């Protein structure tokens, strides 16, 4: 296991479409997931996608068993490893909410996302995951899955006046936030 370097916006490897995982339960896949979990924990992220550490596979992780100091107001999302995900939109409601990204350090922006989604995929052993979620959970999944199609959240924003430095927008997070 190792904390891996997180690629930053501007690196063309963040703009690729990721490849599906072909084999589950392999040492290679477990090694990748272990590295992702360690890297996300070290950065105190709410989620991480494999392309962010330069691995062009459809693997995302998100959630935690404890509140995240970078998002102290956010409801808990169960710790999840999600592979080869597919999202389906439920209803037509969108909502705006603040997002940050470990590949866009120091910044936050208000991003429109679908309020309710279904998502399907597989865990590391290849067992099916099938959930319908809303709110912050739905936002995190949409954000992470966007990394698998080469999209970073600023490209989803409609109003760039709601884009700025975390330390200015949310000074109360200082000390809890090192991105
Ligand atoms: Ni991100």
Image (cartoon, rainbow, N blue to C red):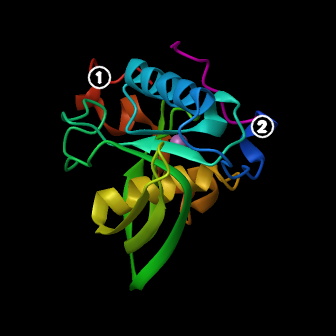
Q: Which residue is mark 2?
A: 13
- Residue 54 is a magenta residue: no
| Mark 2 Cβ inside 8 Å of ligand 1 | no
Residue 108 occupies quadrant: top left
As drawn, the label of residue 20 is: none
- Write the residue at 22% across / 30% down: 172
Q: Which residue is mark 1?
A: 174
What is the span of residues highlighted in magenta in the rendered image?
1-10
Residue sitting farthest toward the right: 12
Q: Could you say which is closer to the camera, residue 66 or residue 79?
A: 79
Magenta span dominant secondary structure: loop
Residue 67 in percent (x, y) is at: 19, 35
Q: Is residue 51 left or right of residue 159?
A: right
Q: Tell me the SS state at disc 2.
A: helix
Residue 137 occupies quadrant: bottom left
User: What crowding class fits label 1: few (fewer than 14 Cα within 10 Å), some (14-19), or many (20 or more)?
Assistant: few
User: What crowding class fits label 2: few (fewer than 14 Cα within 10 Å), some (14-19), or many (20 or more)?
Assistant: some
Q: Say whether marks 1 and 2 touch (CB < 8 Å).
A: no
Residue 124 in percent (x, y) is at: 48, 42
Residue sitting farthest toward the top: 2
Q: Is residue 44 above or below residue 77?
A: above
- Write the residue at 69% across / 33% down: 55
Q: How many marks?
A: 2
Residue 155 in percent (x, y) is at: 64, 57
- Residue 9 is a magenta residue: yes
Between the C-alphas of marks 1 and 2, the distance is: 30 Å
- Write the residue at 20% across / 38% down: 72
Q: Tell me the SS state at disc 1.
A: loop
Residue 35 in percent (x, y) is at: 52, 22
- Write the residue at 29% across / 64% down: 135
Q: Is residue 49 above or below residue 126?
A: above
Question: In which quadrant will I find the C terminus?
Answer: top left
């Amino acid at each position: 296991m190792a904390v891996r370097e997180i690629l930053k916006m501007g690196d063309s490897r963040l703009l690729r479409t990721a490849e599906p995982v072909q084999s589950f339960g392999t040492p290679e896949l477990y090694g990748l997931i272990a590295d992702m979990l360690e890297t996300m924990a070290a950065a105190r992220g709410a989620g991480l996608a494999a392309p962010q550490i330069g691995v062009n596979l459809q693997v995302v992780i998100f959630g935690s068993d404890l509140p995240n100091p970078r998002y102290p107001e956010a409801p808990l999302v169960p710790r999840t490893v999600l592979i080869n995900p597919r999202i389906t939109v439920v209803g037509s409601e969108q909502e705006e909410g603040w997002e940050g990204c470990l590949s866009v350090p120091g910044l936050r922006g208000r991003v429109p996302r679908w309020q309710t989604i279904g998502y399907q995929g597989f865990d590391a052993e290849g067992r099916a995951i099938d959930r319908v979620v809303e709110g912050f959970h739905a936002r995190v999944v949409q954000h992470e899955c966007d990394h698998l199609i080469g999209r970073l959240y600023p490209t989803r924003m409609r109003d760039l006046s709601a884009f700025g430095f975390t330390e200015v927008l949310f000074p109360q997070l200082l000390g809890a936030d090192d991105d």
